[in-house]
Image: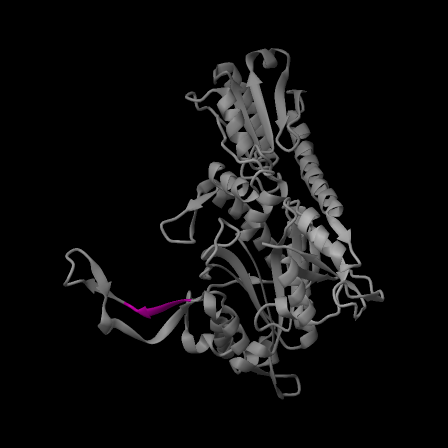
Amino acid sequence: MSKGITSRGENYSQWYTDIVKKAQMADNSAVRGCMVIKPYGFALWENMKAELDRMFKETGHVNAYFPLFVPKSLFEAEEKNAEGFAKECAVVTHYRLKNDPNQKGKLMVDPDAKLEEELVVRPTSEAIIWNTYRDWIQSHRDLPILINQWANVVRWEMRTRLFLRTAEFLWQEGHTAHSTEAEAIEEAQRMQEVYATFAEEFMAMPVVRGRKSDSERFAGAEDTYTIEALMQDGKALQAGTSHFLGQNFAKAFDVKFANTNNREEYVWATSWGVSTRLIGGLIMTHSDDEGLVLPPRLAPIQVVIIPIPKPNEVIDAAADKVIAELKAKGIRVKYDVDKKKRPGFKFAQYELQGVPIRLGIGKRDLENGEVELARRDTKEKQNVPVEGLADYIENLLETIQKDMFQRAIDFRTEKTTVVDDFDTFKDVIENKGGFVSAHWDGTEETEQKIKELTKATIRCIPNDAVMEEGKCVFSGAPSKCRVLFAKAY
């Protein structure tokens, strides 16, 4: 099987696209900037969604659903949010088509079907949700509201890339309402940690927890908490954000509650979200020139069994026994009985799709009481006894998960550089890549100048940043802690 994947070192962007398409994850659609998520890619998203949904519910959240369309007047109510997303909005102006009298078989917009008020296709749902919360909240007894929705959103991006940046994408967005500032901040920080835990424990993708600078935070937020990951090309990926919205949306939509002293106050708010962009992050954290490398906890297929050279009664019986034992342990397993494809073709196919463990079962192996086992992450092969195989695989899947995480940690460590002067800063950003830890004077002017000169942005002010006196890497002005810079997706 010819994989036709461009080498990472030759063209990283093409390598990424090759893997997404050839591994049957997604493809471009007839709509510019939109994608079709294929069954294998959607199975991965379903696994991610299931784990995140469980984590949300364990922290007290419930799911709901809100409309796709937002009346323009509602969208405009919170000024900073509206301005921040205005250029990415798709807008519905008419509600009907009709036959074009000048072109037979063609349709045209019916000029008599113009909407009284234009509708924004949601780029995010704060406006429609806070307009709804106004009706739900009257008293402190109605708070907190802890709601999440799984939905699609539209942001009319000009430069798109499968999973990483598309005009329409799938995501979840949490929207919570609280009676105190402290409770809302605690919620925003809690969800940042939920995202970080998911990224590290399920995606095997290490992340830096931190806060965005003022210029990088979410439009309409008082504070944005982020998790930042480092991809194999040395660029950062914003993998998830959680926003403390203060009372901005409550004031914009007049959402008040009677406190315990029966005095009216504005509600405190948060919002938080991750999207199918995580799939892009997963691909770029672990994969290689042979295709996907998937962490076992999320892989749609954790173990694939391939009969050698083809299925027969003896091999089928052995495979059935192994399958039953693996399924009893909750392990996702597939037995490929396709007689039209040779074992070598199947080996390449499942390597391309990143299946963590491959078992080859042949008559001679069974006579020796063994099967051939191959790890996708290291490409190691070994003969393993059939006796106790399910226990061995269960332990090996956990080992693979931990090993993948450790390799990603080691890569990030090697690609994180402490810098104290701007010449070194420029050299590292341009030639080594990765995270640069440097002092910053806290001004937007310096931040923007660094971005103009190097294309590097402040990814975050790390939560664990050590307070230390220093000088800004660009301006030389006093600084009290280091921040992380990087080029980013």
Please state which of residues 333 and 483 is positioned toward the viewer in this rendering.
483
Asked if residue 92 lies in the magenta stretch, the reply is yes
Quadrant of the frame with the C terminus = bottom right
Residue 357 sits in which quadrant?
A: top right
- Expressed as whole percent of the image width and height from the top left, the position of residue 263 reads 63, 88
**Furthest residue in direction front, as rendered:** 423
Q: Total marks drawn?
A: 0
- Expressed as whole percent of the image width and height from the top left, the position of residue 18 reads 50, 39
Q: Image height check: is 419 above or below 73? A: above
- Expressed as whole percent of the image width and height from the top left, the position of residue 257 reads 58, 82
Q: Image height check: is 441 above or below 377? A: below
Q: Is residue 473 left or right of residue 7?
A: right
Q: Is residue 261 left or right of residue 7?
A: right
Range covered by the magenta-colored residues: 90-95
Q: Please indicate, yes or no, whether residue 333 appears anywhere in the rendered image.
A: yes
Residue appearing at x 56%, y 41% in the figure: 11
Residue appearing at x 44%, y 22% in the figure: 341
Please state which of residues 454 and 110 is positioned toward the viewer in this rendering.
454
Residue 260 sits in which quadrant?
A: bottom right
Q: Please indicate, yes or no, whether residue 334 appears anywhere in the rendered image.
A: no
